[in-house]
Image: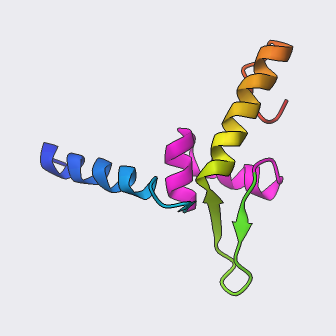
Amino acid sequence: MDERSTNIVVAEKELAYESPMLTVEEAAFYLRIAVSTLRHWVSDHRIPFVKYNRTGSVRFRKRDLDKFIAQSVDKGMEDGSRGDPEK
């Protein structure tokens, strides 16, 4: 991928953050984790998500992800862990 294509992909992902709802891929990119990790967290109900009944698709509110990050960081500071949601 050339530099111009890379810039376009990054710009598209940045624009997605302006939307209040993120896809699994966008949320994983935002959290800087693998999509598979995010899917595991969803199936274990470790992270807040919205599931649309008609399609079964999963979306994430950016404000919920920001709160999740803040709580994970706070928890890590309290118990000395890295703030992983599994702990």
Judge left or right: residue 44 versus residue 42.
right
Judge left or right: residue 2 versus residue 50.
left
Q: Which residues are magenta?
A: 23-47
Residue 29 inside the magenta-drawn segment: yes
- The residue sitting at the bottom extreme is 54
Q: Looking at the picture, does residue 73 appear above or below residue 4? A: above
User: What's the residue at 23%, 47% (across, down)?
Assistant: 6
Position of residue 11 measured from the top left corner of the image (x, y, whole percent): 29, 51
Q: Looking at the picture, does residue 51 appear above or below residue 55? A: above
Residue 63 inside the magenta-drawn segment: no
User: What's the residue at 63%, 41% (across, down)?
Assistant: 66
The answer to which of 5 and 50 lies nearer the viewer is 50
Judge left or right: residue 5 versus residue 46.
left
The quadrant of the image that shows the C terminus is: top right
> Can you tell which quarter of the image residue 22 is in?
bottom right
User: What's the residue at 80%, 12% (across, down)?
Assistant: 80
| SS majority, magenta | helix
